[in-house]
Amino acid sequence: MCDEFTLEADDAALAKRGLSRREFAAVSAATVGTLAASTAWAAQDGGPALTESTVAVTTPDGKMDAVFVHPAEGKHPAIIMWPDIAGVRDANKVMARSLAAQGYAVLLVNQYYRSAPAPVMNSISEFFNPDSRAKLTPMIQKITNPGIQSDARALVAWLDANPAVDAAKKIGVEGYCMTGGYGARCANAVPDRIGAACSFHGGGLVSPAPDSPHRLMKGTKALYLFAVAQNDDKARPTERDELRLAAEAAQVGARIELFYADHGWCVPDAPAYQKVEADRARTLSLWHYARMG
């Protein structure tokens, strides 16, 4: 999860690129704009036409706002996409559209809906600001582990009732940064419906808590991908082994992969964004999703 350690790493990444935070914000906005244009072009150039809408999913705690994007025709396997600590914004929408263009119905959800509708932040650059980070603190405190699991049940029910979703197929879940462990929580909450769970530079995956994500794999039926950033691995050198042993004990399929990129590398507006490694992570996630059944 993003903390002072990853903020320092982001500062170092920007320094290597010779960018100030202000300059990086402009560069990342341009990058997201370029990716959005390329996704639109791909749809026009033989890829599936996409339909996108803002939706509301009723949960026990209220109305969760989300972006739903999927091929315009037919029924498709569903993916729940939980964004990183900065929440739903244009960068995540680009990622959701790109995944939808692979033939999936993608529900990009606002984990902060108990506090505010999206966007809470317009880019990860805002997270550099201490006041912005302070704004997130009470929002994060409203997210509980039982709440994530009740959200999962509501999201699965909503997807299964949607005409764009192939409810005969299992559902995938992916999370980034603070939501990296949400896949395991969702799979634990709805084991018969979640077929794959992918964590990208996830935080809080292994802890002493009885409901730590690595313990929740037991009793699930999902395939797991844990895509680990090199600086996260350096900070938590035993975590990959602990995840592997937990997966073996739970008798679930899991790939724990170290990436030679830093925390945040999958998200196009992040200082550590690395397209080649982000594409490799997406390729691995697609392999998992294709085997959901």
Image: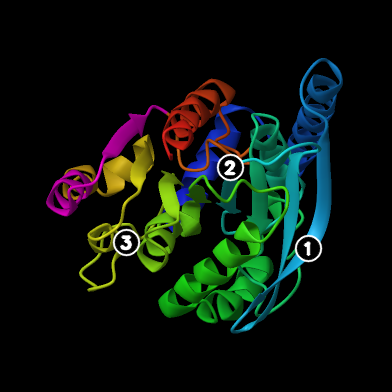
Q: Secondary structure at mark 1?
A: strand
Q: Secondary structure at mark 2?
A: loop
Mark whose residue sits in front, 1 or 3: 1
Mark whose residue sits in front, 2 or 1: 2
Q: Which three-letter amino acid code belongs to the residue tagged 1? A: Val
How far separated are the C-alphas under marks 3 and 2? 24 Å
Which image quarter is the N terminus in? Answer: bottom left
Residue at position x 39%, y 27% in the image:
260
Range covered by the magenta-colored residues? 243-260
Q: Along the line of sight, which residue is nearer the eye, 271 or 225?
A: 225
Label 2: few (<14), some (14–19) or many (≥20) C-alpha neighbours in 10 Å = many
Which image quarter is the C terminus in? Answer: top left
Q: Earlier in the sequence, mark 3 or mark 2?
A: 2
Specify whether residue 269 is in view: no
User: Which residue was labeled with disc 2?
Assistant: 77
Q: Which three-letter amino acid code belongs to the residue tagged 2? A: Pro
